[in-house]
Image (cartoon, grey):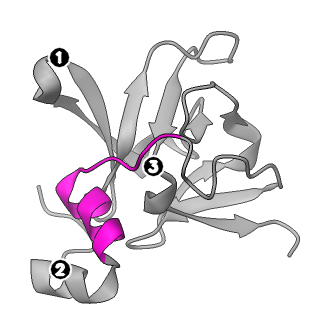
Amino acid sequence: MGYEVSKSDDQWKSELSPEEYAVLRQAATERPWTGELLDEKREGLYTCKACGNELFIAGTKFDSGCGWPSFYESVRPEAVELREDRSLGQIRTEVLCARCGSHLGHVFPDGFGTPTGDRYCMNSIALYFKPEKP
């Protein structure tokens, strides 16, 4: 699939830190409870660290207790791309940025008590947070 933002691996490597590149471009996962956005509680907007695409609003973030920032829906359905992921011997739904194809995390149907029932489990390192009020 072609993305609006398309770059070579060399370009991505020059723009992202090695850790960001591993998660965003190689679908690695940051360790639980280590992400800088896990405990972020301010109002604002979460965007893709690779391309700036708007992904989640702070009002949809909730504490799922999983160790990664969790949201119950994306800012717009077309902001993310969902893809079947059969790695790790199980079937999961991978979440990618629809603008650049970067790996963000996975979505699970266990967001109990949320309006959608979904839990978008995202890597902090894949996101940039823009506070509503600096």
Q: Where is residue 28 in the image (x, y as percent from the top left)?
A: 26, 50
What amino acid is labelled 2 in the image?
A: Lys
Real-space Cα distance between discs 2 and 1? 30 Å
Determine if residue 8 is in view: no
- The answer to whether 66 appears left or right of 77 in the picture is right
Quadrant for residue 26, please give it: bottom left
The residue nearer to you, when weighing 5 against 120, is: 120
The residue nearer to you, when weighing 20 against 109, is: 20
Which residue is at 45% across, 14% downward? 109
Query: What secondary structure is marked by label 2?
Result: loop
Determine if residue 29 is in view: yes
Q: Residues within 10 Å of mark 2 (few under 14, many from 20)?
A: few
Quadrant for residue 65, please give it: top right
| 2 and 3 marks in contact (CB < 8 Å) | no
Query: What secondary structure is marked by label 3?
Result: loop
Q: In the rendered image, which residue does mark 3 sit on?
A: 123
Q: In which quarter of the image is the C terminus?
A: bottom right
Identify whether 7 is placed above or below 129.
below
Disc on res. 7: 2
Give the overall secondary structure of the magenta segment: helix
Which residue is at 82% across, 66% downward? 132
Q: Which of marks 2 and 1 is nearer the N terminus?
A: 2
Query: What secondary structure is marked by label 1?
Result: loop
Q: Position of residue 104 (x, y in %)?
A: 38, 50
Q: In the rendered image, which residue does mark 1 sit on?
A: 90
What amino acid is labelled 1 in the image?
A: Gln
| 3 and 1 marks in contact (CB < 8 Å) | no
- The answer to whether 126 appears left or right of 129 in the picture is left
What amino acid is labelled 3 in the image?
A: Asn
